Image (cartoon, rainbow, N blue to C red):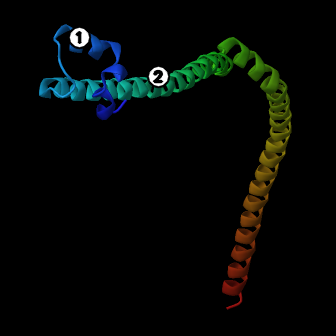
Amino acid sequence: MKVEELLNKENLPDDLHWVAHEYQLQPNDPVFLLIAWHWAHTRKAEDTLRAAQVELKAALDSRIKTIVGAIDKADALADKLTRLETALTPKPAEIARDFDEAVRPGLADVAKNIAALAKSSAALAFHAQAAVAAASRRQVLAGVIAGVAFGITIAVLIFFR
């Protein structure tokens, strides 16, 4: 409603009609004009506030829905993270059992191979010691023979001189 429409007493809203009647104000009275102008602006401000309230409520409702959805997802994620943590948490007994199952057969084979290698190495070491002893004896014998031959050669050279 415009201010010009308020100047006609028939168009007055109930609030202003009561004021005009109670205080016997005429539409051309400056006080009446001031009250009408103030009433019109107050009414416009109330309408603006109601529109803003509706917009705010709509915006908040959509944000609340978004937040509720996010909370639901966070709850579901928390449950999944708990299950993942449980699955990834090391269990020493199971790890030891799995390790034993995976490593024990290989370790037993390695132990057998080492024992067989030790036996064959012992035989090889025995034969190597025997060969070294024989070589030492041959070396000593060769040294003795070389010494005797050298001595004989020297004796012959001295004798025929």
- What's the amino acid at mark 1? His
Q: How many marks?
A: 2
Q: In this orientation, which residue lies closer to the viewer: 109 or 116?
A: 109
- What's the amino acid at mark 2? Lys
Q: In this orientation, which residue lies closer to the viewer: 68 or 71?
A: 68
Q: In this orientation, which residue lies closer to the viewer: 38 or 91?
A: 38
Residue identifier under label 2: 57
Q: Is residue 65 left or right of residue 27?
A: right
Q: Is residue 122 above or below residue 50?
A: below
Q: Which mark is residue 30?
A: none
x and y, in percent, of residue 60 in the image: 47, 24
Q: Quadrant of the C terminus?
A: bottom right
Residue identifier under label 1: 21
Q: Is residue 101 left or right of residue 44?
A: right
Q: Residue visible at 13% across and 28% down?
A: 30
Q: Residue visible at 19% across and 23% down?
A: 35
Question: Looking at the rendering, which quadrant does residue 80 occupy?
Answer: top right
Question: Counting residues from the N terminus, which is met first, the one under dot 1 or under dot 2?
Answer: 1
Q: Neighbour class for label 2 at 10 Å: few (<14), some, many (≥20)?
A: few
Whole-number angstrom distance, CA of label 1 to CA of label 2: 39 Å
x and y, in percent, of residue 140 in the image: 73, 59
Q: In this orientation, which residue lies closer to the viewer: 98 or 56?
A: 56
Element marked by disc 1? helix
Q: Neighbour class for label 1 at 10 Å: few (<14), some, many (≥20)?
A: few
